[in-house]
Image (tube, rainbow, N blue to C red):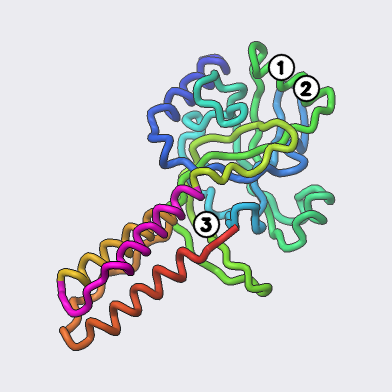
């Protein structure tokens, strides 16, 4: 099977996924670490706070990158309506010392990153982008994913972040110079969580078991929207404890939806 066929198969696999589930991550500068023939090593993630308030741990990619990488396409600008531009050959977790010096300077708190080696196609957009890379155009990199496990964290300066512990990687993209993080999906998810919280606060009726059960359903929904793994359900509390648990669950939802870029 040739590179173009493999790249097309990877794109077809990605197109079967519900696009609303995909988030897109920030650009990294510089994206290109090395070029050998048509094989380009691209740095597409650094484990530092990004522009949408996330820290993506290097280990978060372990499961996706250990499975069938031929199902993960290398795209241009996350465009699912165009053919893939390259075939991903391998993924490489990097330690801090392996990051370029300018990246280490830009992200002083980074401990590592993720790179991939991709073989660019000899025709179409793949050939165009590859020629641009060789000529020194400052392309950057991004990736599409779904967070499957994350936790909130407050940084030393008080900034609240979502730490992504595990994700499902759908694609890697070469993006145009200056392309900012695509925060659209993340903003949509947060707004939905806030809508649910505001609705339940506005009409909450204390003291009923079914109300508390509904609030726990909303907590699970917010967890899902934010990509946070739900905690095991507690046994149903006695009636006298309902008010305090209501306040506790509302406070937990408040804390999660305070995560901000």
- Residue 189 seen in the figure: yes
- Magenta part, dominant SS: helix
Q: Residue furthest front?
A: 202
Q: Earlier in the sequence, mark 3 or mark 1?
A: 1
* Label 2 packing within 10 angstroms: few (<14), some (14-19), many (20+): few
Q: Is residue 146 above or below residue 245?
A: above
Q: Along the horizontal axis of the image, is 128 left or right of 12?
A: right
Q: Which residue is mark 1?
A: 128
Q: Is residue 258 above or below residue 20?
A: below
Q: Is residue 16 above or below residue 156?
A: above
Magenta-colored span:
186-209
Q: Position of residue 180 (x, y in %)?
A: 67, 42
Q: Position of residue 48 (x, y in %)?
A: 67, 57
Q: Which residue is mark 2?
A: 132
Q: Which residue is mark 3?
A: 164
Whether the magenta-drawn stretch holds residue 97 is answered as no
């Amino acid at each position: 099977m040739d590179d173009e066929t493999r790249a097309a198969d990877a794109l077809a696999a990605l197109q079967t996924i519900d696009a609303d589930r995909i988030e897109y991550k920030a650009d990294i500068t510089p994206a290109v670490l090395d070029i050998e023939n048509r094989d380009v090593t691209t740095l597409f993630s650094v484990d530092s706070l990004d522009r949408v308030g996330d820290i993506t741990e290097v280990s978060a990619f372990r499961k996706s990158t250990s499975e069938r990488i031929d199902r993960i396409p290398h795209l241009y600008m996350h465009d699912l309506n165009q053919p893939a531009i390259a075939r991903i050959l391998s993924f490489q977790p990097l330690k801090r010392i392996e990051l370029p010096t300018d990246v280490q300077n830009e992200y002083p708190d980074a401990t590592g990153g993720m790179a991939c080696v991709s073989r660019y196609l000899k025709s179409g957009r793949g050939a165009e982008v590859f020629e641009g890379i060789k000529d020194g155009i400052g392309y950057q990199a991004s990736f599409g994913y779904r967070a499957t496990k994350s936790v909130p964290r407050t940084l030393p300066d008080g900034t609240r972040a979502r730490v992504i512990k595990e994700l499902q990687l759908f694609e890697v993209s070469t993006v145009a110079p200056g392309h900012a993080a695509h925060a659209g999906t993340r903003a949509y998810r947060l707004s939905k969580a806030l809508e649910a919280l505001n609705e339940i606060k506005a009409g909450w009726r204390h003291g009923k078991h079914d109300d508390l059960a509904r609030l726990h359903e909303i907590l699970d929904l917010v967890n899902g929207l934010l990509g946070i793994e739900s905690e095991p359900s507690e046994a149903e509390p006695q009636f006298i404890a309902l008010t305090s648990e209501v306040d506790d669950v509302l406070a937990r939802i408040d804390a999660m939806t305070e995560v901000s870029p």
